[in-house]
Image: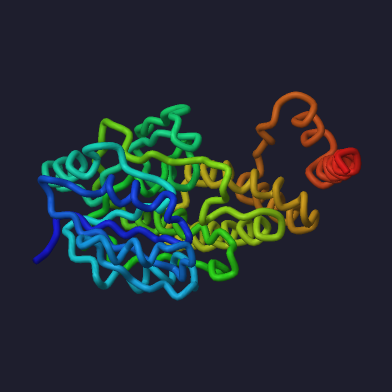
Amino acid sequence: MSADISVIIPARDRLWALPKAVASCRSERLAVQIIVIDDASADGTAEWLKSQADIEVVAGEGWGKPAGIARALPLANGKYLRYLDSDDWLNEGTNELQFDIAERENADVVVAGLDYYEDDVLTHTQPWQESDDFIAKMLGEGEGSAYSSFLFRRSFVVDIPHRTLFAAANFASRDDRCYLLEVALRHPRIAVSPKPALCLRHHKQPRLQFRRRLASIGTFIQEIHIYRQILRMLQERNELTPRRIRAAINILWRLAHRLAAADLDEGCDIAAWVYRLDPKFRPPERGVLGWLYRTFGFRATERLLNVRRAAVDMVRR
């Protein structure tokens, strides 16, 4: 029997959080299919899952989130689909509310804001900001949202993969950003849910998609690769508008700065790309840092910042 909503939850050594994520998906009114990807957990996750009669389990075999989702997606039979990290959970009534909106407005995607938590304490809410250009929004215009806040019509997205370069090596794959951009390129019918859908948890333990040091560099490189691909596709379709370029630059400029801290030449290459995309671009930083970028350029400013970072590191040691 087909479900109303299928929820796919990747999990790896997250038994401390998984039960809350799963419980938030259940519904007394809707038929919700819950599929959990046990990605080679070693913390008792497999045993807990066996005790849950309403959960379908997929063995992820340790290859990372996108590979696990590729194995789970063929099992999904819901009219609508959502993805949920095992660290997070849905606000009460989210599935019911978004399902009703999707049915009423014949939407391909129902978007929503989210609540931020430190462990289990609500810190702030980020409402969905209306936009008349979903592609620009997904590229980086204004405040975004997490894709677990969204409900997707399964028939609209079923052939969009979760792409990755290095997920199995514990780098953040940024598959969610790539996924949303590919959804946006199909010009979906969008409906907005008035209430925050997702409870996004920040906590002391590292999230599944975030790692430090070298892995951060891998994450930045992947995100740059995604933007090169998406902007190329937009250009080939004659859909790369000035507004969308500005939206992409919001992300690319930050990536250039972060990458320059590890590899100055790579960071400078991305900064140069920004100026090719928009020859009139002016660094958004204010104060002394903005003056440095405008007066001495990206490379010289990043050299100074790297010297400062090295001095700070020496003091901390």
In this view, 294 is above or below 48: above
Front-lying residue, 114 or 160: 114
Front-lying residue, 236 or 224: 224
Residue 114 point in image, percent of width and height: 38, 36
Q: Residue at x 26, y 53 (%)?
A: 152
State left or right for residue 85 relative to residue 108.
Answer: right
Residue 129 in sight here: yes
Q: Residue at x 68, y 58 (%)?
A: 217
Q: Residue at x 77, y 31 (%)?
A: 289
User: Quadrant location of the N terminus?
Assistant: bottom left
Residue 37 point in image, percent of width and height: 37, 66
Front-lying residue, 138 or 158: 158
Which residue is farthest top? Answer: 287
Residue 300 in sight here: no
In this view, 241 is above or below 164: above
Residue 91 point in image, percent of width and height: 30, 37
Residue 302 point in image, percent of width and height: 81, 44
Q: Residue at x 10, y 45 (%)?
A: 29
